[in-house]
Image (spheres, rainbow, N blue to C red):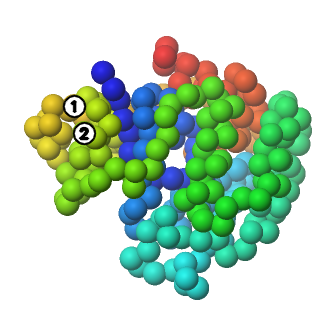
């Protein structure tokens, strides 16, 4: 049995994103779809002493953002964001239990010559975080595969080429995904459940689940995988 998930890339995603990656054999970044403003593609939240704060990557595409622009066609307008984001992370998490350990690799990541393409940059961070969490799932891009016309057919054709027997999808896709298309190609659809995550020791007031996984990593270190998927018994 081979499980595959297909999802758009996000910037320093929340723990549920990595839970899905860890649950499959191949995770495909689907950045050939329209870039959406004010979404998770170029931003995420962290906790600060002043409440939740957005870390947002400034973006552009050929000088402006267009309605038909794909995520993979989206470029970063000001690369100085990296130093600013690290400064905000350092300010918010310098007193967290595992700040020194995590900053050894994360500070370097933010100081490196990062790509100015949003899709590529997101993948750099996703892969680095997967490495820290000991997630060995194969990560590929949707354009590594040929694709058919049709919303569900496109996803099913990609999965078929990977040899998948199970397509793992987020629950939001229930509104449009046609499971029969997968079934006709001898594949099952499995709906991922993001409910039930346990709380962990967290700085700055009342507990919040919907923040970047970096919050979890700074606060729990190498115990982070338990709070991502270990509590499920996987």
Image quadrant in which the N terminus is located: top left
Judge left or right: residue 26 versus residue 180. right
The picture places residue 74, in percent across and down from the top left corner, at 54, 70
**Figure check: 209 above or below 45:** above
Q: State whether residue 78 is above or below residue 164.
A: below
Q: Is residue 16 visible?
A: no
First-in-chain label (1 vs 2): 2
The answer to whether one can see residue 221 in this image is: yes
Q: Judge left or right: residue 34 versus residue 76.
A: left
The residue at the point 77 percent across, 36 percent down is 218
| Residue at the image position 41 percent from the left and 79 percent from the top | 67
Relative height, residue 93 to residue 73 (above, below): above
- Rounded to the nearest angstrom, the CA distance separating label 1 from label 2 is 11 Å
Mark 2 secondary-structure assignment: helix
Say which residue label 1 marks: 188
Viewer-side residue, 199 vs 40: 40
115 vs 173: above or below: below
Contact check, label 1 and label 2, Cβ < 8 Å: no
Viewer-closest of 152 and 45: 152
Q: How many marks?
A: 2
For this orientation, the residue located farthest to the top is 233
Residue under label 2, please give it: 160
């Amino acid at each position: 049995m081979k499980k595959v998930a297909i999802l758009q890339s996000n910037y320093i995603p929340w723990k549920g994103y990595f839970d899905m990656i860890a649950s499959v054999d191949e995770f495909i970044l689907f950045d050939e779809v329209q870039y959406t403003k004010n979404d998770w593609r170029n931003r995420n939240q962290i906790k600060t002493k002043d409440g939740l704060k957005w870390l947002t990557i400034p973006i552009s595409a050929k000088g402006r953002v267009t309605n038909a622009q794909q995520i993979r066609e989206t470029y970063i307008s000001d690369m100085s964001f990296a130093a600013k984001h690290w400064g905000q992370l350092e300010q918010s998490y310098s007193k967290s239990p595992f700040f020194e350990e995590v900053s050894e690799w994360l500070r370097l990541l933010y100081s490196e010559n990062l790509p100015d393409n949003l899709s590529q940059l997101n993948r750099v961070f996703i892969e680095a975080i997967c490495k820290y969490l000991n997630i060995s799932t194969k990560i590929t891009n949707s354009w590594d595969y040929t694709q058919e016309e049709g919303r569900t057919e496109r996803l099913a054709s990609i999965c078929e080429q990977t040899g998948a027997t199970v397509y793992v999808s987020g629950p939001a896709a229930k509104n449009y995904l046609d499971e029969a298309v997968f079934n006709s190609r001898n594949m099952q659809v499995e709906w991922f459940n993001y409910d039930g995550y346990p709380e962990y020791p967290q700085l700055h007031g009342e507990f919040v689940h919907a923040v970047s996984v970096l919050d979890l990593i700074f606060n729990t270190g190498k115990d982070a995988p338990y709070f991502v998927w270990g509590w499920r018994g996987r």
